[in-house]
Image (tube, rainbow, N blue to C red):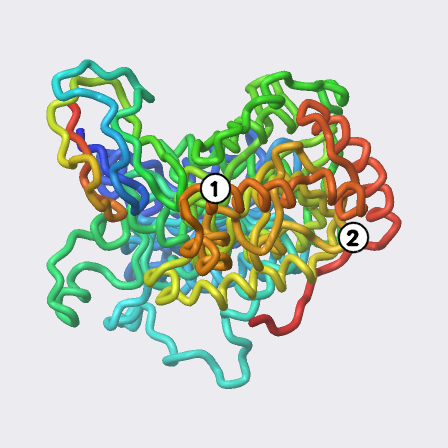
Amino acid sequence: MNWDSEIDEIKQRRKLAKQQGGKDAIKAHHEKGRLTIRERIDALLDKNSFDEIGEGAGVPDYNDKGKLSDFQPANFILGFGRLDGRKVIVGGEDFTVRGGSPNPAGLRKSVYTERLALQYKLPLIRLHEGGGGSVGGTNKEKDRRPLGDPVFSESRFVPLAETLSAVPVASAALGPVAGLPAARLVASHFTVMTQNAAVLIAGPQVVKRALGHDMTKEELGGPQVHLASGAIDNLAEDEDDALGQIRRFLSFLPDNAWSYSEKLTSQDKADRCEDMLADIVPTNRRQPFQMRKIIDAVVDRQDSGSSFFEMSRKYGPSLITGLARLDGESVGVIGNDCMYYAGAMTAAAAQKLRRFVDFCNSFHLPIVSFVDEPGFMIGPDSEKAGTIRHGTAAISAVLQSRVPWASVQVLKAFGVAAQAHFGPDGYVLSWPSAASGALPVEGGVAVAFAREIAAAEDPAARQKELEDMLAASQSPFPRAEGLSVHEIIDPRETRPKLISWLRLAVAAMQTATPGPYLTGMRP
Amino acid sequence: MQVKSEIAGSVWKIVAETGADMAADDVIVILESMKMEIPVIAPKAGKLMQLHIAEGDMIAEGQLIATLE
């Protein structure tokens, strides 16, 4: 006697597990222009680095002689691997088995993904394509089990919630993603979706029955919807681009909240000064400028161009958020985009800012803020959106922030919202174009001096005179005299000045032992 | 190709003429929003077939501004 037949059965089971939903299901999936989950994992990870967990999980079929005849694998694939040489955990639904709607073993593996990330403190990547539970459940004869989880078991959502404070999480929607997989998808620091993906709480048929809307799944939850809703950060041209964006995102981050990001050797000169910065801000304050050009000119250049990696561009677009390298260090970058409502803080921009600042704090990324803040967005739509509460919550997040913070005041810093761009103990540089105060002169003068203007012989001339007088008082020079800013600088000096500060700030930060970032209640 | 406004505001100035050949990033109209002049640009090259707005019009977020071919 020996173990040959059992060892053969192991081989057979492994082979059957790799068949996924079978040849026809895989062919149908490829015809939709999509990769299978195993192909996706191979495309993401360093070559031959996938180390699978739970390959044998699934439901067997036996013939009359009690021999294994078939095997339906768990429809969630999970394992460790290397990404650009770093150890990570990766998982995703297998759409070719039951459309990715979890079978019992698939559900267990999906829940275990977050637990593994917490246990080994490794970055987590999820590649989603699948539906949620069905009312039919999984309670068919061959996989019958007791209904529900034992009352003493931990909720499967506990690790889902805890990962965000512990390890970087990046997820992709690569097809239809609904129900539980959709909840998993957004429980991430970075989410990306392909053009033909859809993210849904419930699909078209359920929506039609309950609400009468006759909509496709793309209309309900396609990229146009969720880039603007903020549920998804970035759009990808195709699956390859989505995986590339995940790789790029993770390149800025440490393995977990207990460590710091690795400093790269910068290929870019620390004393590089860009001439275009000197006159990029128009002297006519009615004319806009491109804040992204300023960011790109200041942060490190890499082979492929700027190191700036923008996130959530279409959500709250008056605020720019992203990651970059400065002197080889990972930093979070914030900027106002005056092309959208003069850069005013909308409810969405405020929520985007709060989430981004909390994210930078979770992974100890210094923040560089390029300021052109006219204030909270005004008007009826803004009031209805509750901008004041979301904005005040964002300010609270900024002021509770513990990472090094530098602010470059490019142009405006007005009203309460201005405070959302200046962190505690921050380093403040001011360009000559900077203007600060309670209100922009153009709006404030007409209100504060209404009687005086009305009584003047030439009201328009008097208003202009008052505006010019007050504009002078918003100049950065008196602020520098009072040490309200560290320096007024020639805009060309922005990069070298920030790098000098960053070297000091990072050295000081790294004298502390890093750990998870936890905060209290906010407005 | 439809060009829509990403912001609310009013039409301050029409820059391009109907029938003109536009290059990508050419300015079609300039809106006034929050006391600033914000250009609406051609996302791709094409002929400006129709302008759906006039100077002084109030514009809502997402409103159709121009059709390019």
* Disc assigned to residue A273: none
Residue at the spot 17% in from the left edge and 31% down from the top edge: B66
Residue B34 to residue A102: above or below: above
Residue at the spot 43% in from the left edge and 56% down from the top edge: A455
Nearest the viewer among A480 and A129 is A480
Of all residues shown, which one is farthest toward the bottom? A151
Q: Secondary structure at mark 2?
A: loop
Q: Is residue A298 left or right of residue A455?
A: right
Residue at the spot 22% in from the left edge and 21% down from the top edge: B16
What residue is pinned by disc 1? A464
Of all residues shown, which one is farthest toward the front? A457
Q: What is the x, y in percent for residue A154?
A: 55, 76
* Disc assigned to residue A425: 2
Q: Amino acid type of disc 2?
A: Asp
- Disc 1 or 2, which lies upstream in sequence? 2
Residue A251 to residue A443: above or below: above
**Would residue A12 be visible to someone looking at this image?**
no
Q: How many numbered marks are there? A: 2
Q: Secondary structure at mark 1?
A: helix
Which corner quadrant of the image does residue B28 belong to?
top left
| Chain ID at mark 2 | A
